[in-house]
Amino acid sequence: MTAMEANGLAEAPVIIAGNEAQKTKYLGRMTEEPLQAAYCVTEPGAGSDVASARTTAVKKGDSWVLNGSKMWITNGGVANWYFVLAKTDPTAPAGKAFTSFIVDADTPGITVGACECSTLATVHVHNNPGNSMPHALRISLCR
């Protein structure tokens, strides 16, 4: 059993700041079928202190390369898509240093890892240079 309310954590940033195409794709389908989303912010060593998060995203051409780890991700092992917060400007104050990314669970390079408990997963986001998808990344989750 997963935490249904956890969908709201991942959906809220899309509701507030997503463009119309993102809202249609990610929010519309949440009501059409029983889908799950996960909010990937908490990190080892930083916990929920977002200002201390170390996951980074670097723009490479038209793609973003994400590197880092997330932990204690509710719905992480069953989510159809993920909201991932990553630092894009290491010199900026915390309120301007981060960018959010929507990552589909079926993005090539995603692997399944160990569960922390029945509904929580660890998410590792690593550079996967062989991946030509819009988000060059690898995410390890439990199912």
Image: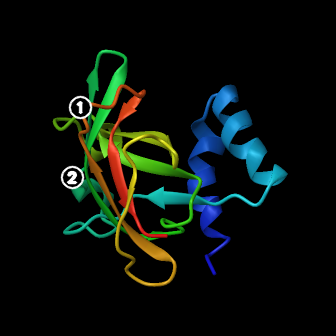
Pointer 2 or 1: first along the chain: 2
Q: Is 140 drawn above or below residue 127 in the view shown? A: below
Q: Which residue is at the front of the view, 56 or 95?
A: 56
Q: Residue at x 47, y 41 (%)?
A: 107
Task: Name the amino acid, label 2.
Answer: Arg
Task: From the image, tell me which residue sits under label 1.
Answer: 129
Q: Is residue 88 left or right of residue 74?
A: left
What is the crowding at mark 2: few (fewer than 14 residues within 10 Å), some, or many (at least 20)? some
Q: Which residue is drawn at 35% across and 67% down?
A: 113
Q: Residue 54 shows which numbered tag?
A: 2
Which one is closest to the eye, mark 2 or mark 1? Answer: 1
Q: Residue at x 64, y 60 (%)?
A: 36
User: Residue 25, position in %: x, y?
Assistant: 69, 36
The quadrant the N terminus occupies is bottom right
Model colouring = rainbow
Helix, strand or loop at disc 1?
loop
